[in-house]
Amino acid sequence: MRIPSHPFSPSTIEQIRCAFAGFAGRTSSNSKCLKRASVGIILVAADDESGETAFLLTVRSHKLRSHAGQYALPGGRNEPEEDAVDTVIRECAEEVALNLSRDQMLGMLDVYPTQSGYSITPVVFVVEGESSIRANPEEVERVYKIKLSELLGERSVQFVKQKNRDDVLIRFPVFDHHIYAPTAAIIYQFLELVAGRYQRVDNLAAPDFATR
């Protein structure tokens, strides 16, 4: 099977922008009872001279009280006066020293309710041209640029039925580990949107350890 490479080009960005033009993000029925948070899928040029589209993936600091050491998208809890876009802009500046603006936003995905009590709004941004990215060691141990094509083919999404549970776990193989929900669910919906498909993901679960 031929794996799409998604070159980081104006035509690819316009394709994604057009996909969002016909997309209205859904809100889960129980999301109003949850704490609000937002994360960013930040599209950048891959750093391996392939010319492909990548996104930023962080490893959370082991100093943090929750989700320490886990793979995550840049983001965090919304401040009272913030909308989802404001939160992602602020968190990207704090976590990876990346200054975003609202005109770099391409769209929003479905709100994802987590097992740890959050309602996460994913916001997609594009960063064209050179950008300085630097991890804040208090929050982030490392920042990776993951090509979209790396999560297709042999490293494509995996769905696992959990023992003694009705829900289905979602994960992506990455390096020698896995990305789990909510990050995996959000990335999966984005990849499906890029491919011209809509896939609900609020029914896809994380393993118990990923909720702590």
Image (tube, grey):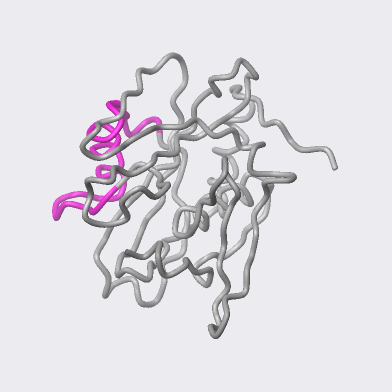
* Rendered location of residue 15, percent (x, y): 62, 35
Q: Residue 100 in magenta? A: yes
Q: Nearer the viewer, residue 84 or 210?
A: 210
x%, y% of residue 161?
Answer: 62, 74
Image: 37 above or below 28: above
Seen from the viewer's position, the closer of residues 197 and 68 is: 68
Name the residue rendered at 67%, 46% in the picture.
155
Vertical relation: 125 (above or below) 157: above
Whether 146 is among the magenta residues is no
Magenta-highlighted residues:
76-104
- Looking at the image, which is closer to me, 86 or 132? 132
The N terminus is located in which quarter?
Answer: top right
Name the one closer to the observer, 10 or 40: 40
Instruction: Name the spot of residue 18 as percent of width and height, x first.
Output: 58, 40
Residue 134 is situated, as x and y percent measured from the top left of the image, at 31, 24
- Measured along the vertical axis of the image, is residue 171 above or below residue 51? below
Q: How many marks?
A: 0
Q: Residue at x 54, y 46 (%)?
A: 21
Residue drawn at point x = 29 percent, y = 56 percent = 37
Residue 189's quadrant in the figure? bottom right
Identity of the residue drawn at 21% across and 37% down: 138
Q: Is residue 53 left or right of residue 128?
A: right
Instruction: Locate the C terminus by quadrant.
Output: bottom left
Instruction: State left or right for residue 57 relative to residue 174.
Output: left
Furthest-right residue in view?
Answer: 1
Tell me the quarter of the picture where residue 114 sits: bottom left
